[in-house]
Amino acid sequence: MERNMRTSLIMALLLLCTWSCSEMVNGQQQQQRRRQQQQQQSCRGHHLRAQQPYESIRSEAGTIELSTRQDNDELDCAGVEFIRETIERDGLSVPRFQNTPELVYIVEGEGRLGVVFPGCPETFRRPPFGAGQGECQRRRRGSGQEEGEEEEERGSEEERSRREQECARDESSQKVRRVRRGDVVAIFAGVAYWWFNDGDKPLRIVAIADSSNYQNQLDKRYRPFFLAGSSATRERRERLGEGRNYGGNMLAGFDTNMLAEAFGVRKTTVMNLQENTEGRGPIIRVTEQHRRRPGQNVSLNEEDTQDDLPSTENGLVQLFCNMRLRHNADRPEDADVFVRDGGRLNTINRFKLRALTHLNLAAERGVLRPRAMFAPSWLSCHAILYATRGDARIQVVDNRGERVFDARVQEGQFLVIPQFYAVVKRAGDQGFEWITFTTSHSPIRSSFTGRNSVLKGMPQEVVMHAYNISRREAHELRWNREHEFLILPPRRQEYERGRSNQ
């Protein structure tokens, strides 16, 4: 009997894994077809621009900035939308979900992230706002003497056990993750999540929402669905106060009596759910009594290790509940490319963060020293580059050999680089740091120069005749950078030229 049950369990897990893989493959194939159909018209030749988000939504404790596909040809070509969010100290970005998967990068600050997968257990027992101990624990400790005096009189063992169970339920939730600068975070479509800034400075994040992803079955717009908060006015850089609203509490749209019956609560409670945050927007400030207590933050390392624990639970828990959703891209020891005088490149793909397999997205974190170069290369997918520090001169060339972008990209700007367009970067005198979001979970990068140069992989005679150059020139072209890979440190004369231009 036990053997049969074990065999049945193994077969069920195999079927679940097979179904999950087939759904993922079918979904990605649908995504590719949809992306191709939508972009045949939108990816025609045009000049690129380094730009800032042009829509701003101000709230009580922060700001959301957007650039959407509807008004941006480059983003429409890539099939994504760009989001930048700033959450002030003690700010709570209220629970929401959206119709698209998101890939997020933490530019500055630290805080907490809660992600709620349907069906996963509420095993987390720590207050979300870092108060150090829960209200139930304080009540229990404060009433210990009274309970001790009453225990003999009324035998309150069962009552106390019931009260403790209620306290545990009140403080339980699904896992709350610690996030910090450099984290790349994967957010699934339709999954509710929230951010809270318990640090000492603003929590700044940038993200792309992949509205061409197969998980989005609505139109090609990014649509956030807020579970709380209130709507706020969208403002554009060129004309302020358009009057269009952003967000809005979904519960406010339901009939009060029906919600009261559905939740099993009083009507006044439902009215509070619908109206209590009116005028505060989607980012609200946590009130004084709920703010964190200094020195009682949970350490980053303590919560990091919980993401990697092996699971012995059922298939649902293995697939989603214990899934790692973040990976820090700012660690030099984790760099895929490291050049002492040039910089480094950290790639976050599905091999480092398995959740990206389901999103079909990835990221690259790059750091260039002053005057260093990132070799001319191209990616097998669209890329959205966001400058996090410094500046760089960037050139982009299309399939006709025309330079569609040649300018300096500065901190706070983003640039869309279409699929297969070749790009080269040279850092300015202060260096250059950036994050690139890609529309493939394992993009392939090809380079013109360096150890993995495509020219080095060709016969020398092919290079000679293709470019009509001498044998010596072809040899130098193929081998002069053979010991370098993607990141090229500045030559001495170039470094001196940069210093003289200051």
Image (spheres, rainbow, N blue to C red):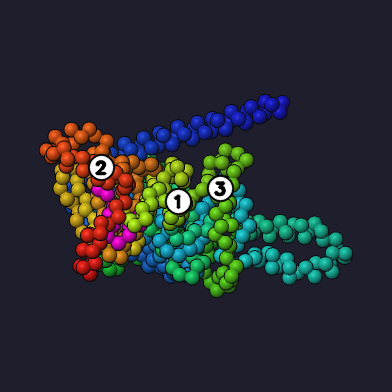
Question: Disc 2 vs disc 1: Cβ atoms closer than 8 Å?
Answer: no
Residue at x-position 51% and y-position 53%: 115
For marks 2 and 1, give the one nearer the viewer: 2
Q: CA distance from mark 1 to mark 3?
A: 17 Å
- Furthest residue to the left? 468
Mainly helix, strand or loop, the magenta region?
A: strand
**Badge 2: few (under 14), some or many (20 or more) residues near its Cα, within 10 Å?**
some
- Furthest residue to the bottom? 288
Residue at x-position 22% and y-position 60%: 493
Q: Tag 3 or tag 1, which sits nearer the N-term?
A: 3
Q: Tag 1 or tag 2, which sits nearer the N-term?
A: 1
Amino acid type, callout 1: Asp
Point out which mark residue 334 bears. Answer: 1
Percent position (x, y) of residue 136? Answer: 68, 64
Amino acid type, callout 3: Asp
Percent position (x, y) of residue 277? Answer: 48, 67
| Helix, strand or loop under label 2 | helix
Point out which mark residue 308 bears. Answer: 3
Q: CA distance from mark 2 to mark 1?
A: 28 Å
